[in-house]
Amino acid sequence: MVSLAEIQAARSLLEGKVIRTPLVYSPTFSEMTGAEVYLKLETMQKAGSFKVRGAANRIFGKKDDIGKGGVIAASAGNHAQGVAVAASMAGVAATIVMPEWVSLSKQEATVGYGARVILKGGSLEESIMHAVQAARDEGLTFIHPYDDPLVIAGQGTIGLEILEDLPDVDLVVVPVGGGGLIAGIATAVKAFRPGSRVVGVQAAACPSAAEALRQGGPVAVGADPTIADGIRVKRTGDLTYPVLRDLVSSVVLVKEEAIMGAMLQLLERKKVLSEGAGAAPLAALLSELVPLAKGEKVALVISGGNVDTFLLERILKKGLYAGGRMVQLAVTVEEGTHSLPALLQVLARAGGVVNRIDQERSAPDLPVHQMRVILELEARGRPHREALIAALHDAGFAARPFPEGY
């Protein structure tokens, strides 16, 4: 297990190489939960996530052992960019193996930091296997994304920074993939605050750490698609598991809808752009999966902000629908010059904002004297959404969610 001394050594080594990110108090989330909630914004770190800490500590910590070919890593995004940035700072070449499904924006960002990118593997685990083999074949130094003592120690510097800014922290909530981040943070925090709690959060789509704790050791789990792709790791690390077992109070699982909602809340309430993995701690808190005492001081590790722009648009739209802030309705009305104006007047009186209107006249299920109006509306939340539907019904318009049951 990584020691506190190793994390403190990493802190000294990383001085001036990485950003000391802020711990920001959130009045909004504090009021919503009854606790004092602070956000550790690794979204503001170099390359947009915490990963550069571990990568830089590993590369600079053993720079003399790195050959002319440089380093190689496997990653779906953040570790790739962290290694590329750290390697650039150290003046060594970097090769990154990425799963074949990784987004174009993450590929381009990694190349932009100076790395050579190889697309290989249908999962992160397959990419890691290919990178390990390539390291042997080409004489490269492999940088593991989480199961490496120097990487874990580098991530643990976040814990030291939290303690400096909030010495009496009661609870630290951390996203968990392979476990390197939470292992480092838990080691640092529990060394100074043994009575505090460290809680891990995973996407329910890939519960590898939760299952490891349940079964008493790392096991491979199935992984469904998740917007929290940064923590979609099918097997917890062998080095990180003992720390999870001994120092982490629990690992909770959050659903996709909760993660999307947390991303939207962070953007709207704190103007923080977070990726799915980074928003997972807030999702767990707002879903009441983490027990809280009134007034407890809570630090949420918002681990990164590297979210694909096109994916972000879809996530925010779905988050608005799930939160009742947007709704699509199908309304069947009689053909005629007055039907549509009357429908819109009802919505205007009820305070609905119309984003889009589509009309269907030739659908097979429609009588020739009727048309279907499909509306996309903005609402203030679920109660207002229901009030809009009720207002339409009271005015004689049979409105239903569209698609059916949405």
Image (tube, helix red, strand yellow):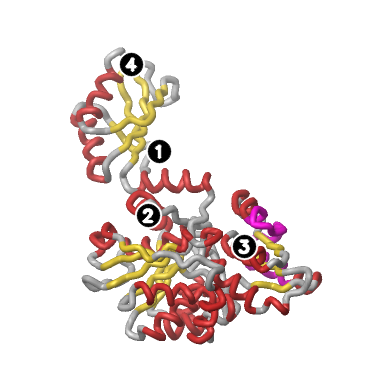
Image check: 291 left or right of 208? left
Q: CA distance from mark 3 to mark 2?
A: 26 Å
The picture places residue 168, in percent across and down from the top left corner, at 30, 78
Q: Secondary structure at mark 3?
A: helix
Which dot marks residue 403?
Answer: 1
Residue at the limit of the structure toward the right, as seen here: 137
Give the distance between the C-alpha atoms of the residues marked 2 and 4, in whole angstroms: 44 Å
Report the amino acid beneath label 4.
Glu
Which residue bears the numbered disc 2?
266
Look at the numbered discs 3 and 2 and tell me whether their residues touch, using CB distance below 8 Å: no
The residue drawn where x is 41% and y is 20% is 361
In the depicted structure, whether residue 89 falls above or below residue 108: below
Q: Is residue 50 above or below residue 336?
A: below
Query: Within 10 angstroms of label 1, few (less than 14), some, or many (20 or more) residues?
Result: few
Task: Give the magenta part as a residue range.
Answer: 110-132
Q: What crowding class fits label 4: few (fewer than 14 Cα within 10 Å), some (14-19), or many (20 or more)?
A: some
Give the residue at mark 4.
335
